[in-house]
Every structure is written in C-alpha cells, then in structure tokens.
Amino acid sequence: MIEINIEKKLNMYNGGQSIKFSGRFPLHMVTKITGPSGAGKTTLLKIIAGLITSESGRISVNGSIWLDTEREINLPPQKRLAGFVFQDYALFPNMTVLQHLQYATKDAEWINRLLNIAELTTFADHKPIHLSGGQQQRLAVVRALAIKPKLVLMDEPFSALDSKTKSRFLPALNILFEEIKTTAVIVSHYPMELDVFTGNEISMGE
C-alpha cells in the first residue's frame, strides 16, 4: 500500500494557496487521478517521485518511508526508482528511439517487445524530432516502463494519441502492468479514456 498525507504551498506570491492530499493507493493496481487544471495533480506526482518536496507530510510505500518531514526523511528520486512520464515527454533530442530504451535496459527481448507495443519498431533509428507527437508520447511511456519499475507515475500520458491508437496501446499497457506487477498512478483530464484499466479513482480539487 502507498500511503500519502502531504501539504504543499503553491503560488506563494499571490495568495498562499496550497494543496493538501491524503490517500491510499493499492499496490500492483492502477490508481486514476482526475480533476480540473490547477488542482495539483502534477505537483502530487512530482512529490511522490521526489522531484519536489512538500512543506509537510509523509509518504510510505509498502512499509518503506520515502518522506517524513517530522523525522527529516526524504529519499532522493534515484532511490525511489519510480518511472515517470512527463507531459512534455522529456526525451533526449540526440538519442534515437532505440537508444532511449537501451539507456534504461540491456534486455534486447524486452526492448523489442516495448517497441512493438508502442508501434515504434520501424522508427527505432529515428530521433524525437522526426517522430509525431503521438509517437513521442508512446516512446516516453515505454521508456518509463523499460526498467520494469515497481511504481510508474504518468502525467497525461495519452493526450496526443488518437482513439484508434489508444484502443490498441492502452490494453497492451494494462497487460504489461499486470505482468511486471507495477503500481501505476495515472493523471488524466479525461477519466473515460482510462476505463480499460481496473483500479481505483481519486478526484482532486472538487
């Protein structure tokens, strides 16, 4: 179980707004987080990953303490070993599709499977600038899964995909999640697109 109870100040120069979040995410399942823009969904993912720090709170993952501000515990991102899919993809411009995956894993069979699922096999030697937005987004997703993370955090990971591509890609991802027993936390403005994933749903900012 992932248990989170955090508070993070936002917009400190125009009103001192903050987000407060308290919730529990089951392991080896998908948790879908929805809510309007500005609700703090992206901030929450970055706090879980250790990319930013909350002023107060606690995060525990399967009994391991990742954050406890009272005890001054704050594991760095590299020790949390979470896969992360950013809204802007965060791809390396000088790396090919294949090199992105090889940077994460040396397992050629696993790489080939990810390329196939993402429908990028024929684009393996292409750099991001030569890919469409949807192809870049699929690369960002499978790159995050290349290390077979126990936790993957995904921020609007399917926004650039058309409905036909989603109908193929999302069920394949669901199978991968179950196979590698990863816990996925997916942020989306469009909860209906996540219906393929079984799990719980949390709404923020309502």
Image (cartoon, rainbow, N blue to C red):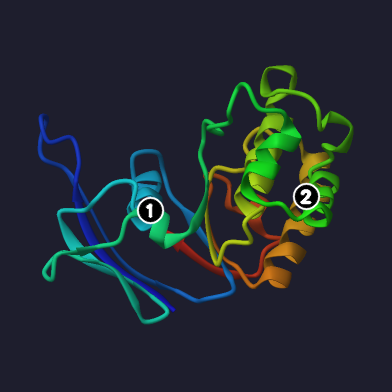
Q: Label 1: which residue? A: 77
Q: Is residue 154 left or right of residue 18?
A: right
Q: Amino acid at mark 2?
A: Ile
Mark nearer the N terminus (2 vs 1): 1
Quarter of the rendering containing residue 89: top right
Closest to the observer: 128 or 202? 128
Q: Is residue 181 left or right of residue 3?
A: right
Quarter of the rendering containing residue 140: top right
Query: Residue 111: which disc?
Result: 2
Q: Quadrant of the C terminus?
A: bottom left
Q: How many labels sit on residues?
A: 2
| Residue 8 in picture, x, y percent from top left | 20, 51
| Residue 139 in picture, x, y percent from top left | 69, 38
Closest to the observer: 169 or 150? 150
Q: Residue at x 50, y 76 (%)?
A: 26
Q: Quadrant of the N terminus?
A: bottom left
Q: Answer few, some or many: residues within 10 Å of disc 1's Cα (few below 14, many 20 plus, some between 14 and 19).
A: some
Q: Residue at x 43, y 49 (%)?
A: 35
Q: Residue at x 63, y 22 (%)?
A: 94
* CB contact under 8 Å: marks 2 and 1: no
